Image (tube, helix red, strand yellow):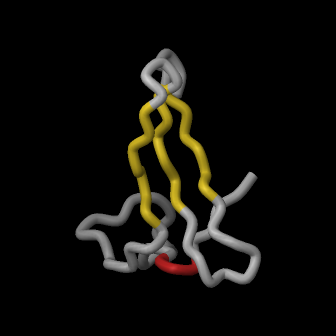
């Protein structure tokens, strides 16, 4: 993230979609990791932000990589 020691890192689940992935904040100054979005959490959040056509969290299909 600009102006900080934090990177947003995608954690890959698997190729078959049976293991969810996650997005984490990684602070390279402290080598600590904090979950930003846990792909295994399929609960619908109280407040959605972003594109209006997105009506729910991606849930267990969330498997970021790259």
Q: Nearer the viewer, residue 65 or 55?
A: 65
Residue 64 percent coordinates (x, y): 64, 61
Q: Residue at x 52, y 24 (%)?
A: 28
Residue 51 shown left or right of residue 63 in the figure: left
Residue 35 shown left or right of residue 65 in the figure: left
Q: For residue 47, what is the image quadrant? A: bottom left
Residue 39 percent coordinates (x, y): 48, 69
Q: Residue at x 55, y 33 (%)?
A: 7
Residue 11 percent coordinates (x, y): 60, 55
Q: Residue at x 42, y 33 (%)?
A: 32
Residue 64 shown left or right of residue 46 in the figure: right
User: Is 61 above or below relative to 31?
Assistant: below
Q: For residue 57, what is the image quadrant? A: bottom left
**Tally of numbered discs:** 0
User: Is 13 above or below relative to 55?
Assistant: above
Residue farthest along the front direction in this orientation: 31
User: Is 33 above or below relative to 2?
Assistant: below
Q: Nearer the viewer, residue 36 or 19?
A: 19
Residue farthest along the left direction in this orientation: 46
Q: Nearer the viewer, residue 56 or 37?
A: 37
User: Is 12 above or below relative to 16?
Assistant: above
Residue 22 percent coordinates (x, y): 52, 60
Q: Residue at x 53, y 22 (%)?
A: 2
């Amino acid at each position: 993230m600009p102006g900080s020691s934090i990177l947003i890192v995608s954690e890959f689940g698997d190729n078959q979609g049976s293991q969810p992935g996650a997005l984490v904040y990684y602070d390279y100054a402290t080598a600590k990791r904090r979950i930003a979005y846990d792909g295994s959490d399929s609960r619908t959040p109280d407040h959605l932000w972003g594109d209006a056509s997105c009506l729910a969290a991606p849930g267990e299909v969330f498997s970021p990589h790259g």
